Amino acid sequence: MKTFHLKKEDVKREWYIVDAKGKNLGRLATTIANILRGKHKPYFQPDVDCGDYIIVLNADKIAVTGKKLTDKEYKYHTNTPGGLKVRTLEWMLQNRPTEAIRLAVERMLPKNKLQKRYMKRLKVYTSDQHEHQAQNPKPIEEVAKLWKAI
């Protein structure tokens, strides 16, 4: 029996939609990261981009447990002396809610050349409306029940 190696022409991409209202940030991000990578597919290979598209709605209404709103910090540096900037999760959800979900998912993906490709397939919106009705997205719950995460 020969070893099967997946080619990018063989990959069939689906569109999934998830409503983030009331869902935990970390559990939602792990499910999204796994679907972006394609780990739910029987022909998954870590070196081939075989994931699907994800649409996230109501990004500003996610839930977190404990004191994460005030204690979780996002740090970045402006590359100038004294340029360390620190933002809390509460600030991110008020000012840049799509960025909070995007960063949570991006940091759960492997740090390699495929990471940018995965992130291009993530679409995050703060409202119930999106511009991808033509793709007929399916609810993420039918795939996510494999992990029982969300």
Image (cartoon, rainbow, N blue to C red):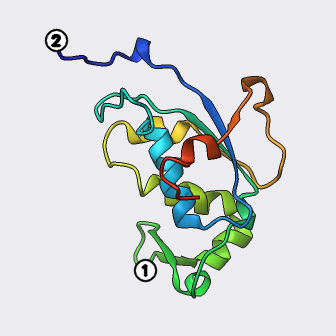
User: Where in the figure is residue 88, as x and y percent of width and height?
Assistant: 58, 79
Query: Where, by quadrant of the figure, is residue 64 drawn?
Result: bottom right
Q: Which is more toward the observer, 118 or 91?
A: 118
Image side of residue 10 versus residue 55, left or right = left
Residue at the spot 55% in from the left edge and 47% down from the top edge: 144
Residue at the spot 56% in from the left edge and 54% down from the top edge: 102
Q: Is label 1 in a helix, a strand or a loop?
A: loop
Quarter of the image with the N terminus is top left
Q: Amino acid at mark 2?
A: Lys
Q: Is residue 69 above or below residue 48?
A: below
Quarter of the image with the C terminus is bottom right
How dense is the environment of label 1, judged by Cα within 10 Å: few (below 14), some, or many (20 and up)? few
Residue at the spot 49% in from the left edge and 47% down from the top edge: 146
Q: Is label 2 in a helix, a strand or a loop?
A: loop
Image side of residue 12 versus residue 42, left or right = right
Q: Which is more toward the observer, 84 or 74?
A: 74
Q: Is residue 140 above or below residue 105?
A: above
Image side of residue 37 versus residue 86, left or right = left
Residue 82: which numbered mark, if any?
1
User: Where in the figure is residue 58, as x and y percent of width and height?
Assistant: 76, 57
Q: Is residue 26 above or below residue 53?
A: below
Query: Where, by quadrant of the figure, is residue 69 drawn?
Result: bottom right
User: Where in the figure is residue 112, as x and y percent of width and height?
Assistant: 31, 43
Residue linked to disc 2: 2
Exactly how many numbered labels are in the figure?
Answer: 2
Q: Earlier in the sequence, mark 1 or mark 2?
A: 2
Taking the view exactly as shown, the residue that stands out farthest to the left is: 1
Residue at the spot 79% in from the left edge and 30% down from the top edge: 133
Residue 121: which numbered mark, if any?
none
Contact flag, marks 1 and 2 (Cβ < 8 Å): no
Q: Amino acid at mark 1?
A: Gly
